[in-house]
Amino acid sequence: MAAKGAIISGARVFSQSATAYSPNTLEKHEVTSRVLDLLRSISLIDPSKVSATTGFKNDLQLVEVNMAVEEEFAVEIPDNDAQKIATTCHLMDFIAAHPHAKWDSFRG
C-alpha cells in the first residue's frame, strides 16, 4: 500500500478525505471571489493589498481572518490547520477542500 501523497505511475495518490465528494463542495473560483471580498472588508487589512498571494502579517490579523472565514463559510478551522495558513492562497485551498463549507450564508 502506498503512502499518502506518494507517486504511483505518474499519478498522485490522495487520502480519501482529500478526494471525497460532497454536494456542498465549493468551486475554486467561488471561494476565491468570496475570500478576497471578505478580506477586503476586514478593518485590519488594507484592501488595496489583498490578492490571491497576500500573506498574513501577524497573529492578530490571522485570528481576525479566521474568525471572519469561519462565519462566512460556516466552517471551523482547527488550530493545527490555522497554523498552516500563511497566505490567502492557503486559505482558499483549505475552504475549497472543506466538505462542509457553505455556498453562502443563506443556504443550509
Image: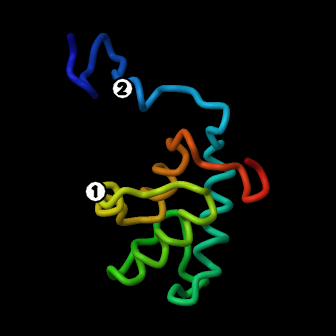
Residue 21 in the image: x percent, y percent?
Answer: 57, 27
Residue 94 in the image: x percent, y percent?
Answer: 46, 50
Q: Which mark is drawn over residue 23? A: none
Picture residue at 33% right of the left edge, 16% below the top: 10
Amino acid on which disc 2 is placed = Phe
Q: Quadrant of residue 49?
A: bottom right
Q: Residues within 10 Å of mark 2 (few under 14, many from 20)?
A: some
Pointers 2 and 1 in contact (C-beta within 8 Å): no
Q: Quadrant of residue 68?
A: bottom right
Amino acid on which disc 1 is placed = Asn
Residue 80 in the image: x percent, y percent?
Answer: 28, 56
Going by the picture, which residue comes out furthest to the right? 106
Q: Residues within 10 Å of mark 1 (few under 14, many from 20)?
A: few
Q: Which mark is drawn over residue 14? A: 2
| Viewport quadrant of the N terminus | top left
Residue 30 position (above or below residue 61): above
Q: Which mark is drawn over residue 80? A: 1
